[in-house]
Image (cartoon, rainbow, N blue to C red):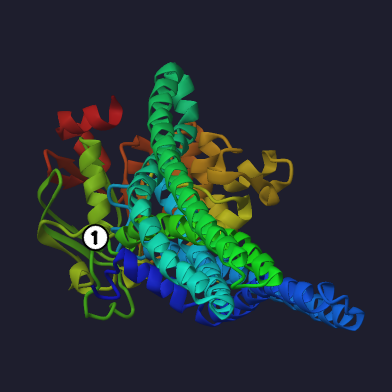
Amino acid sequence: MSAAHPSGRAVLRESIAGQRGRVALSALFGSGHQIGEALVPALIGVVIDRAVTGSDTGALVLWLGVLAAVYAGLALSFRIGAWSGELAAVRAEHSLRVTLVRRVLHPGGGAEKGRLPGALANIATEDAKRVGAVNMALTLGIAALVGIATCAIVLVRTSVTLGLVVLVGTPVLLWLGHLLSKPLETRSEAEQEQAAHASAVAADLVTGLRVLKGIGGESAAIERYRATSLDSLRATLRAARAQAFQSGMVLALTGCLIAAVALVGGRLAAEGTISLGQLVSAVGLALFLIGPLEVLAWVNAELAQGRASATRIAEVLAGAPAVTAGGSPLPSPVRGAVRLTGVRHGGLRGVDLDIVPGELLGVVATDPAHAADLLRCLSRQADPDAGSVELDGVSLRDLDPAGIRTAVLVAEHDADLFEGTVRGNVTAAAPQATAPEPAMSAAGVTQVSETLPDGEHTAVSEQGRSLSGGQRQRVALARALAADRPVLVVHEPTTAVDTVTEARIASGIRDIRKGRTTVLVTTSPALLAVTDRVALLHDGRVTDTAPHAELVRRHEIYRSAVLA
């Protein structure tokens, strides 16, 4: 699997490799902590044998000092190890989020195919967090293995039999824990899929809340979300049952191993093979084993969930781009000549259209779906199934999508606003040297600002919900105009404004875009009246081009589309 198309395992490896230094540091100090923890029972046994049994006060003070030093060392090691491990986890999580966002925002697109925005958000948050947590799990797992190894070494020095019980029992326990984690991995993946879908549906409903209330669709929406949420709950409960079963079984097996160590140790003490202090050490070490073995059980669960989340992340990163970058350079300077030749895509059935540089062209599509298909081709969100779209004589297929968007801006009807201010939204894509005031005036945003509490510095909430529909449209149009692209395509920018404002905006667009290619995809008579000519897109083809007034006179279909 190449770097461009990673697998779930590759995502996990890259996440760990990116934090190799912090993982190593955390594992080192975590191992120091575990070694210290394992030495405590052994030292207590030494104190009993060398100081308590023989009533040697000097030896008691000496070994208690050694014990205190070990405690101080393991406490410090724990703090440093935990800090390094958590840092590795959050850094890896952050890196994955950035990588996912970069892929989703890639000009070639494709990552969002078949996924709602809420699902992508869930992958970039919850799944990235789970994969990042694998770094912490790995450091704790290494430290737990070192602790078990230390325990085994101490027990072997005490009694070969006791050491063998640990050395043989631990690998068997780990193997069984791995087998028990398989159902958890499968159910965890299903849990995340359902959670992402529920999140996506919720986000979708919140976005369309006003529409739902307007049509009285609240009940149907609630039922839809209830069913989706219930599916997510069931998947979560299945995953929780799998995790509980895995944890319970591993805990039971751990108890069996500890009981075996205690039983063998007690028998050896009864036979006089080991001393009282060594028996206390053996029992203490057996109890100590509960900690690292529980950690290993938790690590198994974290790795299972991490693998499931990494697979979901890999699917997004491996998504094929909707369009690929060509090798031709962008024309310089861009004159703005656009030509469509035999374009077939979606409902388009062989569109032929020449747009000359500096022209203000209207496009009336009798089917809204055909307008959407045209916009996708002009913005190169998709390549035509047949035919070509050219910019200054160069096919868009031969250009980099990122380069195209520096020359051609397609402002869609449902464009969202960003959280920030009115002015900040307008200047979001504007060149630094360009003043936004002309664009704000042309789009009617200046008048909107006068009615807002803080003018153009009024805060705008997420997706512009704090503004009315007409205000949002005007701010979005001003943003497109302020971007000052050589070619601008605008889709129905005035559907939510009154007729007087619409007429002012039409004149404003004509004035501010004079000498640059502009395409207005609309059925608004006010906008069409200021265009140089209009192309009638009917039945998937351009059936006629002429000034607006002439098309009104000679086409019943055109009159129905723009005057009905």
Res. 481 visible in picture:
no
Q: Residue furthest front?
A: 271
> Which quadrant: the C terminus?
top left
Residue at (29% x, 77% y) in the render: 330
Amino acid marked by disc 1 = Ala
Give the number of marks.
1
Res. 235 visible in picture:
yes
Q: Is residue 141 above or below residue 527?
A: below
Q: Is residue 129 left or right of 529 when viewed as pictured? A: right
Mark 1 Cα shell of 10 Å, populated few (<14), some (14-19), many (≥20): some
Q: Is residue 3 left or right of 77 when viewed as pictured? A: left
> Which quadrant: the N terminus?
bottom left
Q: Quadrant of residue 543?
A: top left
Q: Is residue 92 left or right of 485 when viewed as pictured? A: right
Q: Is residue 293 above or below residue 221?
A: below
Quickly name the residue at label 1: 322
- Residue 304: x and y in percent read 39, 56
Q: Quadrant of residue 205?
A: top left
Q: Return the residue nearer the eye: 459 or 79.
A: 79
- Residue 463: x and y in percent read 53, 44
